[in-house]
Amino acid sequence: MKLPIALPIILALGIAGLVQTQGSAEPVEDMPKEVRPLDAFMRRKLELSRETLQGIVTEDFPLIKRSAEGLEKMSRQAEWEVFRLDEYSHMSAEFRRITRALAKQAEKKNIDGAALAYMQLTMSCVECHKFTRGVRMADVKPVKK
Ligand code: HEC
């Protein structure tokens, strides 16, 4: 699959997505107490997805694979399960599917495929955060740890 024109657009979207995720981040002080210890964990997702983007723009396939697998691993950890809600589980499953696709594209050294999967990854970050904010506004309490 060749997508020479789509690639810069995808990367721009990806960067915009990351900036948006970061820019709209609620200040730590405003976060409900029970979530604050999760901050470092959640921010690690941003680090790993930046590494993925770095891997894509520098065609560093091992870096893409490593960071995608790191993200997948994170999504299996207990800290990930902030809400025990069906939609949250579905979005987590979708996130895992995308990280696996990303790792696979890296294995195949398919840069366009990896860029496309990266765009999907970014959309999944944004989708779940939109959902999470909605749930917060409805004042659903996170799972107690
Ligand atoms: C399945 C849901 C889900 C997905 C997918 C997801 N996140 Fe999150 N993210 C959360 C939850 C839940 C929080 C905690 C915020 C809260 O509880 O209000 C969070 C918080 C964060 C925070 C901390 C925000 C802050 O205010 O400090 C960052 C950064 C973050 N996520 C980055 C990412 C990135 C980057 C991706 C995609 C690679 C991603 N997330 C994908 C659910 C998700």
Image: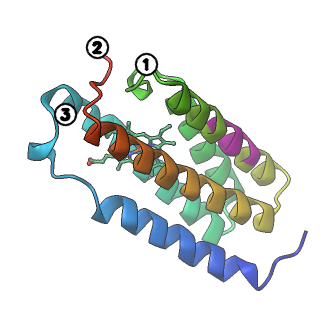
Q: Which residue lies furthest to the front in this view?
A: 138
**x then y, percent, for residue 58:** 63, 70
Residue at the disc numbered 1:
78
In the image, residue 13 sits, relative to residue 44, either above or below, namely below
Q: What residue type is labelled 1?
A: Ala
When asked about the image quadrant of residue 61, the answer is bottom right
Real-space Cα distance between discs 3 and 1?
15 Å
**Is 44 positioned to the left or the right of 96 in the image?**
left
Task: Identify the residue shown where x is 57% and y is 33%.
Answer: 92
Residue under pointer 2 = 145
* Residue located at (80% from left, 82% from top): 4
Q: Mark 3 points at which residue?
A: 36
Q: What stretch is highlighted in magenta?
A: 96-101
Residue in the picture at 48% in, 45% down: 128
140 shown above or below 8 = above
Q: Assess whether mark 1 and mark 2 are in contact (beta carbons under 8 angstroms).
A: yes
- Locate the C terminus and report the quarter of the image it occupies: top left
Q: Which of marks 2 and 3 is nearer the N terminus?
A: 3
Q: Is residue 42 left or right of residue 99?
A: left
Judge whether residue 75 can be spotted in this image. no
Q: Kindly identify the residue that appears in the image at 38 percent across and 41 percent down.
A: 132
Q: Is the residue under label 1 in contact with that under label 3 (CB below 8 Å)?
A: no
Where residue 56 appears, x then y in whole percent? Answer: 64, 65
Name the N-terminal-most of marks 2 and 1.
1
User: Where does the N terminus fall, quadrant-wise?
Assistant: bottom right
24 in the magenta segment: no
Q: Report helix, strand or loop for mark 1.
A: helix
